[in-house]
Image (spheres, rainbow, N blue to C red):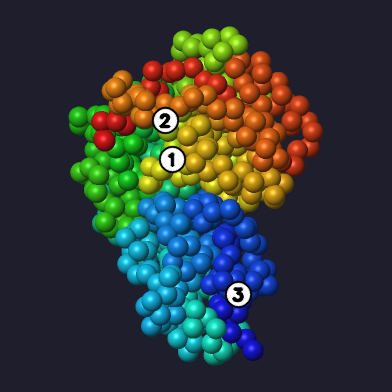
Amino acid sequence: MTTVADQIGALLGQLGIGHCFGVVGSGNFHVTNALRAAGVPFTATRHEGGASTMADAYARMSDTVAAVSLHQGCGLTNAATGIGEAAKSDSPVLVLAAEASRGALHSNFAMDQDGFATSLGAEAHRIHTPETAIADVVRAYRTALRERRTIVLNLPLDVQAAPAVGSIHGITIESAQAQRPDHRAVAQFVDLLEGSERPVFIAGRGGRCAKSEITALAQQTGALLATSAVAKGLFNDDAYNLGISGGFSSPLTAELITGADLIVAFGTALNMWTMRGGKLIGADTKIVQIDIDDAAIGAHRPVSLGVVADAAATATDAMALLSNNQPVRYRTEPIRERIVTGARWDQTETKDLSVPGTVVDPRAVTQRLNELLPSQRIVSIDSGNFMGYPSQYLDVPDEFGFCFTQAFQAIGLGLYTAIGSALAQPNRLAVLGTGDGGFLMAVQELETAVRYQMPLVVLVYNDAAYGAEVHHFTEEDHDTVTFPETDIAAIARGFGATGITVRDVDDLAAVTQWLDSSPTAPLVIDAKIANDGGSWWLAEAFQGH
């Protein structure tokens, strides 16, 4: 007999789920096996929190819908932080959550799964009956795909076990058509562009699929280019690329963005992080915000013009209305030379904080690792005081080389993110920047990376503290956020990974040896870092707390 669980798995495989992550229990065993039988790769994680964040990262870096398979009740609650991160980030993730049978109010696993999912910002769906199962699955998958939503699809146990009804033959779902802008809005946009002398375009998550269109418009209008952190690498090929806008900006990048008379946001919220709490916006700067979500327009700051439309469609339509002249505007030769020689943080002089043989400057260790690792890489970032260093000192080849799961501001998602990203981009070396606190929160998934033979580089910025809090709290509070020194390299070796301790840049020679060994297990670098006094981006960040 084909059950509804069998039917759900087969249909999702047919629709195009890219990968599934999860922890298998009695409630999700059958649907997980059905997914695997349909050809969907499955990664068995050590904790549901790891599974949900891996799915989030996979969806971002593969641009496909990823799935999470969870046991009823506690399996769903364990996955909460990753689901919340995915929902806040508009990631197309489908959470397959087993649910206590209808009417089983006294089950240990019974809970309000709809209400719980909604509280996380996800959208709650359900398989209602065997007769509606196909339509319910199609609706949930279509919403995740077309609206880039995180969906919790509840699967009641009694419905899962019932005989399947109907045929899934021939069912497919296509991506949504691009939302074109209103003609009057485009005309206003073009007027602002043609009246500008120093335009800057900033692209975020919503601009990642519009690289060529945004770049062409920038070249035609003389605009400089920048990104929010989540879109790092998008404009690498353009000589007028400023890099990341916001707290991570180099002094030159911040200067040129602040000097703009027009800022155009393509699919980015212009929030406190991207605009340094508004400090990167000049007093007379006009702002255009382009987003497919009407609610996003002006949500963080007033705008001169809001355009509710797809980024690529808006850029294309604007180019059609622009005059044929090609003004230089902000794209002058002196500006290009300044960008080439000074837009990066490693081109900015800083004091070396290293104490030879004891602690290493976090900038120095990151710069050296950037030189040692192959250029085809995918970099993931955990949250914490250290995070500006891997974000700015580690290069990435393009927008699919950087995964930044920071929408929920949760420490400890980095290792999960790196594993999900690595599976999404298997031809690139996965690299993680994390703190000692975040790494130890997620250390159980190091076993997952070892089990799946992943050559993952984990750079642990180890200051034996929750570093951001050390710089944020008073000295009287430090005993709650500082810890004895931990031998993280030894812990890594206990999981079957390679572990090295770095107290000096020269200790990174072991990285080359690891790379030359055709590795099939992670390398964990326990970098004993110097106190940086609170990394450069913290001053702006903490003003928003």
Q: Circle 2 is placed at which residue position?
A: 466
Disc number for residue 490: none
Mark 3 lies on a secondary structure that is: helix
| Residue type at tag 3 | His
Residue 482: percent from left, percent from top = 42, 26
Which residue occupies 61% across, 15% down?
Answer: 504
Mark 2 lies on a secondary structure that is: loop
| Residue type at tag 2 | Tyr
Tell me: residue 486, above or below residue 456.
above
Residue 198: percent from left, percent from top = 32, 30
Residue 299: percent from left, percent from top = 24, 49
Q: Circle 3 is placed at which residue position?
A: 30
Which residue occupies 20% across, 43% down?
Answer: 302
Q: In which quarter of the image is the N terminus?
A: bottom right
Distance of mark 1 from mark 2, alpha carbons?
Answer: 10 Å
Q: Can you see residue 526?
A: yes
Which residue occupies 60% across, 79% down?
Answer: 6
Q: Quadrant of the C terminus?
A: top left
Label 1 or label 2, whichever comes before in sequence order? 1
Tell me: residue 464, above or below residue 154.
above
Q: Circle 1 is placed at which residue position?
A: 411
Mark 1 lies on a secondary structure that is: loop
Q: Is residue 25 left or right of residue 84?
A: right
